[in-house]
Image (spheres, helix red, strand yellow):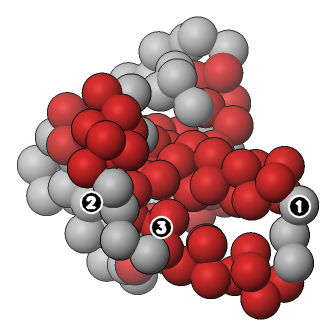
Amino acid sequence: MELKPQLANQLRGLRMSGVMETLSARERQAIDGQWSYLDFLSRLLEDETERRAQKQLAQRLRRSTLNTNKTLEGFDFQFNPGVNRQHILQLAACDYIRQHRNLLICGPTGVGKTQPALCPQKKHICSPRNGDGR
């Protein structure tokens, strides 16, 4: 289906580019699957909602300035045997964030504070249940 210029302008005006991107594919699926009008509309809106959620996540990660390449799974606990693995994993649950509490991790340079400190924040930002980034 070729998008009519008027429809394209209306979707742009409503800032619904996710619908513009998937409209042709969804139209074919609707015809093949004999969807009702409501099913068709629902799937288009799901596409738009997903696109917006992905865009918001990317924006939150960009604004956070977190190093998104590091994960807690990749943390080398053998590097510093003094690091309490269970304590770090407990912090990764982000309970302190949900309780609106601060976390202070201190120690000498080079002992492995940064990665365990950033990974829970990234996990919290990326969590779907925290759609507002809090």
- The residue lying at 74 percent from left, 59 percent from top is 40
The secondary element bearing badge 1 is classed as loop
Quick check: 44 above or below 22? above
Q: Nearer the viewer, mark 3 or mark 1?
A: 1
Residue 42: where, in percent of width, then height?
76, 50
Helix, strand or loop at mark 2:
loop
Q: Is residue 91 left or right of residue 129?
A: left
Q: Position of residue 127 (x, y in %)?
A: 59, 46
N-terminal-most mark, 2 or 3 = 3
- 126 to 56, vertically: above or below: below
N-terminal of the two: label 3 or label 1?
Answer: 3
Q: Residue at x 69, y 37 (%)?
A: 129
Q: Residue furthest top?
A: 100
Residue named by callout 2: 68
Q: CA distance from mark 1 to mark 2?
A: 42 Å
Dot 2 crowding, Cα within 10 Å, few <14, some 14–19, many 20+: few
Amino acid bearing label 2: Thr
**Sequence order check: which comes first, mark 1 or mark 2?**
1
Residue 99's image quarter?
Answer: top right
User: Are the residues flagged by discs 2 and 3 in contact, CB closer than 8 Å?
Assistant: no
Mark 1 lies on residue: 36
The amino acid pointed to by label 3 is Thr
- The number of numbered discs placed on residues in the rendered structure image is 3
Q: Position of residue 77 (x, y in %)?
A: 44, 74
Q: Residue furthest bottom?
A: 32
Q: Which residue is mark 3?
A: 22
**Front residue of this view, candidates 50 and 20:** 20
Residue 52 or 27: which is nearer the viewer?
A: 27
Name the kind of residue labelled 1 in the image: Ser
Q: Nearer the viewer, residue 50 or 103?
A: 50
In the picture, measured across the screen, residue 29 lies left or right of residue 49, that is right
